[in-house]
């Protein structure tokens, strides 16, 4: 699913209006009816709806929503905030139509506002056309909305929120419980700084022409469940363990063998044919006992990794979980990069070694997958002002070194060498616990070993990792999820 800019969305609407053809008002009516259907599905008992409308097309949506609800017999109050003269043509047309069913209250000042004590607030004040910070009467109304204890649902986007950038601190923005977006998600939905101004979000189909969407170029996408089945390879009847690759996992050190164990078990649960783990001697019994399906090779040292086995026999390699940053481990890592040319997965201390020794970046094989959490990425790439800037830096580095980043977070961003970015929709806060990153490493290594293209392995691995976390949270609750639960909840059927 493409993520388009505000300007592109307006062009998309215009394309649909011209080529379906359909009038602007009819398109607004279609969007409003889809919104109402979604809205009513969210509330078991139909409450009183209080709809706050601006005077642009978002306000026109609000008026149409109010009329449709009233036509269906639902209790509705409409407030038109008179923050400017006139209104868009579609707003004015809907103002006439809503007057046949309801009597809108026109708000010229805060004193005109009788604040509701029960029901649901619908925010239809401002849409994606915002070009400057909210001030005056609109700001006052938004602050009142934010002070309420009533549920708040925003139409398409929260009023005051920029769709394509991160608002400066101090901007007045609605803080909804839920945002119902038309046709496509907004870039701001993917950014942690915008989370308070998005809430839970849902995209609804309003019948925008698919060919119009295809004509719009974008570097930003949301991975969807619908495009996954064709990515997952079917396992043939006469397949054998050699068919699904032999992975090498370089992991663990004294006191950190749990990371190696989690990565190994996740790799095994993700379809790899054979798995060898290379660990310090202290980890031999741990792996042989806890993951008996894993073959184990040991380093000469008892506690840290000081060398690397011959890597040429392996289909894919994962490096980093729990290895530490001992100088001898650095030399071993450098040796591996000198002798293995296929894509690998680097996580945890492998990333910390890259940060300490930046010259290693030039040695990374093309399409190597790096899976940093925010702190690891900061150590690797330097401080950035916000998450959007961090994504920009990741795009630059991915293009420069021809590598792939999985920037872990609530909507993990998979950044490809051609600068495309795929955001992930699965996962939950219960996954914010030690070891879940090690699980992701194991999953992606298994996919690489089975011959998945690196970009597919990254996108599919991240999606399935989050999906397993969602299953685990549904069973145990978010607070009770641990990394091992993700492994037990991996599913690979189409």
Image (cartoon, rainbow, N blue to C red):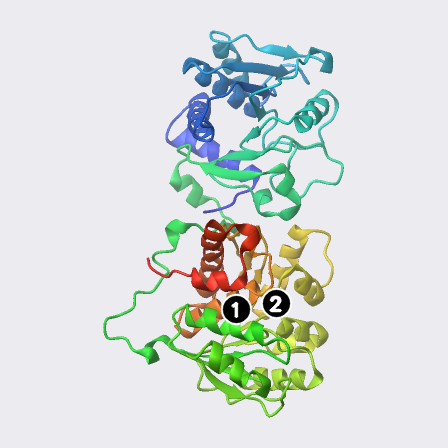
Quarter occupied by residue 406: bottom right
Quarter occupied by residue 143: top right
Quarter occupied by residue 81: top right
Return the disc, 1 or 2, that comes first in the chain's sequence.
2
The residue that mark 2 highlights is 400
The residue lying toward the viewer, choosing from 249 and 181, is: 249
The residue lying toward the viewer, choosing from 286 and 77, is: 286
Density class for disc 1 (Cα within 10 Å; few <14, some 14-19, many ≥20) is many
The residue that mark 1 highlights is 441
User: Left or right: where does residue 260 sit relative to residue 145?
Assistant: left
Q: Is residue 171 above or below residue 124?
A: below
> Which element carries disc 2, helix, strand or loop?
helix
User: Left or right: where does residue 273 sit relative to residue 183?
Assistant: left
Q: Residue at x 64, y 39 (%)?
A: 196
Farthest residue toward the left?
A: 237
List x then y, in percent, for residue 401.
60, 70
Q: Distance of mark 1 from mark 2, alpha carbons?
A: 23 Å
Q: Which mark is residue 374?
A: none
């Amino acid at each position: 699913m493409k993520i388009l800019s505000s300007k592109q969305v307006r062009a998309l609407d215009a394309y649909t209006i011209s080529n379906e053809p359909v009038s602007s008002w009819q398109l607004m009516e279609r969007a409003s009816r889809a919104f109402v259907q979604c809205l009513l599905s969210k509330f078991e008992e139909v409450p009183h709806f209080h709809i706050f409308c601006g005077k642009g097309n978002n306000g026109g949506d609000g008026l149409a929503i109010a009329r449709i609800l009233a036509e269906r017999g639902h209790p509705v109050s409409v407030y038109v905030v008179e923050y400017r003269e006139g209104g868009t043509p579609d707003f004015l047309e809907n103002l006439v139509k809503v007057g046949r069913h309801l009597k809108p209250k026109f708000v010229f000042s805060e004193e005109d506002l009788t604040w509701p004590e029960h029901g649901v607030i619908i925010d239809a004040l401002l849409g994606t056309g915002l070009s400057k910070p909210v001030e005056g009467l609109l700001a006052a109304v938004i602050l009142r909305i934010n002070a309420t204890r009533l549920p708040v649902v925003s139409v398409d986007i929260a009023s005051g929120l920029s769709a394509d950038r991160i608002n400066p601190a101090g901007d007045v923005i609605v803080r909804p419980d839920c945002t119902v977006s038309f046709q496509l998600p907004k870039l701001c939905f993917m950014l942690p700084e915008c989370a308070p101004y998005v809430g839970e979000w849902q995209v609804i189909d309003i019948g925008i022409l698919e060919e119009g969407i295809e004509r719009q170029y974008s570097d930003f996408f949301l991975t969807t469940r619908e495009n996954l089945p064709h990515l997952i390879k079917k396992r043939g009847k006469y397949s054998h363990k050699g068919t699904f690759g032999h992975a090498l996992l370089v992991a663990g050190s004294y006191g950190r063998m749990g990371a190696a164990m989690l990565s190994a078990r996740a790799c095994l649960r993700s379809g790899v044919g054979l798995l060898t783990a290379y660990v310090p001697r202290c980890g031999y019994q741990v792996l042989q006992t806890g993951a008996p399906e894993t073959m184990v090779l040991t380093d000469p040292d008892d506690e840290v990794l000081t060398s690397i086995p011959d890597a040429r026999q392996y289909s894919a390699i994962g490096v980093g979980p729990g290895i530490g940053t001992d100088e001898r481990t650095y030399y071993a890592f450098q040796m591996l990069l000198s002798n293995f040319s296929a894509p690998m997965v680097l996580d945890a201390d492998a990333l910390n070694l890259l940060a300490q020794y930046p010259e290693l970046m030039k040695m990374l094989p093309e399409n190597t997958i790096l899976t940093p959490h925010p702190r690891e990425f900061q150590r690797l790439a330097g401080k950035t002002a916000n998450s959007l800037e961090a994504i920009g830096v990741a795009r630059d580095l991915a293009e420069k070194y021809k590598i792939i980043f999985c920037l872990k977070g609530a909507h993990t961003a998979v950044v490809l060498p051609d600068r495309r970015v795929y955001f992930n929709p699965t996962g939950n806060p219960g996954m914010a616990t030690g070891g879940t990153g090690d699980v992701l490493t194991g999953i992606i290594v298994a996919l690489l070993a089975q011959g998945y293209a690196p970009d597919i392995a990254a996108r599919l691995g991240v999606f399935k990792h989050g999906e397993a976390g969602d299953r685990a949270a549904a069973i145990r609750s978010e607070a009770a999820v641990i990394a091992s639960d993700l492994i037990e909840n991996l599913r690979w059927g189409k």
